[in-house]
Amino acid sequence: MMHHHLILRVVTKLLVGTIILFALYVQFHGDFSPGGGFQAGVIMAVAFILYGIVFRLEKVQRVLPPWVVHKLMALGVLIYAGTGILSFFLGYNYLDYGAFSPDHPSHGQHWGILAVEFGVGVTVTGVMISIYYAFAARTPLIDDEAW
Amino acid sequence: MLVVTALAVVRTRSLFAVVMLSGVFSLLSALLFVTMDAVDVAFTEAAVGAGISTVLLLGTLALTSRYERTARQSPLVPVAVVLVTGAALFYGTLDMPNFGDPAAPASNHVYPDYIARSVDQIDVPNIVTAILASYRGFDTLGEVAVVFTAGVGVLLLISGLRRRRKGGSKAKQEGPRA
């Protein structure tokens, strides 16, 4: 199965790493350039979805099993809410990032935004990949001629 | 071009072409956002609208039939509804301030304050990120919760997790393909 589409498979192998790298750039450079957790999460998910489309679903699920993706969904929300609770316990308001660096409030803001955006990215990645898994797992394999 | 693409979506019978055209539509509206200097929104539109949703629609397409059935009812009623709604929306835009109008309510409420203070308080060059993650942190937390809930909803509806759990090890192997 799928022994043809040589160009697609080679290009995919080249691209997946680049896409993941770009997702990380969008994620952690979101303070300075357009982008942030939402976009980065989607781009990160696209890398895995592309891999799943070109090589079959089983291959990508060997890299990233569904139960891991389901945990990621919840983990992201927990990171976001946990950041808030952490600032809570440091004696500040909920989600007041000044708590992480009382001497330099703007540094604290940097850390807080970084953590929160990371949570956003993790959740979006998890949700997108698991929606793709849910759809793709129900689809019988399609003949290439059918398209 | 947006209008032409939208008309093509309506006229085409092949659903595969419709999915591709809706991706084109998303990319074009992303370009529109770029020309209006909303780079972050354009980024999201390109990634989500043109990328992910096209893939998900293709996945749905593989589950259903590939061609649209010819409509049995007369299209007059839907056309009337669309025309009335469109007219109401156009009427609504008459009250909207011009693009970039300094007197617009959106640029007068809290945003001058955000723009003035964010360099001192947050020191993040991308002000969209500053507002999104810090000033509007609660809103964003809510958005993440919405995304999470949507994912959980889709999983509960169509992933077939329960069937796998009930069916033991044999069903576990076959479960997703069933």
Image: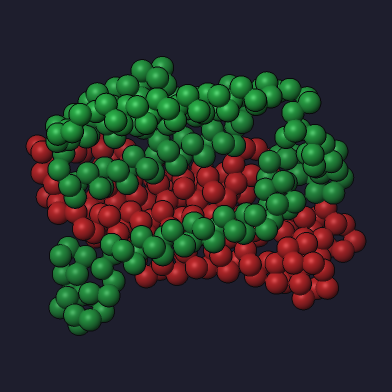
Chain colours: A red, B green
Front residue of this view, candidates B74 and A32: B74
Q: Residue at x 39, y 44 (%)?
A: B52
In the image: residue A67, left or right of residue A125: left
Position in image of residue B85 (x %, y %): 44, 30
In the image: residue A1, left or right of residue A123: left
Position in image of residue B158 (x %, y %): 28, 62
Position in image of residue A10 (x %, y %): 28, 40
Front residue of this view, candidates B109 and B21: B109
Q: In this rendering, is residue B53 above or below B10?
A: below
Position in image of residue A21 (x %, y %): 50, 46
Q: Is residue A2 visible?
A: no
Front residue of this view, candidates A3 and B2: B2
Front residue of this view, candidates B45 and A47: B45
Q: Residue at x 20, y 29 (%)?
A: B74
Q: Residue at x 19, y 50 (%)?
A: B63
Q: In this rendering, is residue B80 above or below A40?
A: above
Q: In this rendering, is residue B39 above or below A96?
A: above
Q: Is residue A40 visible?
A: yes
In the image: residue B41, left or right of residue A111: left
Q: Residue at x 22, y 44 (%)?
A: B61
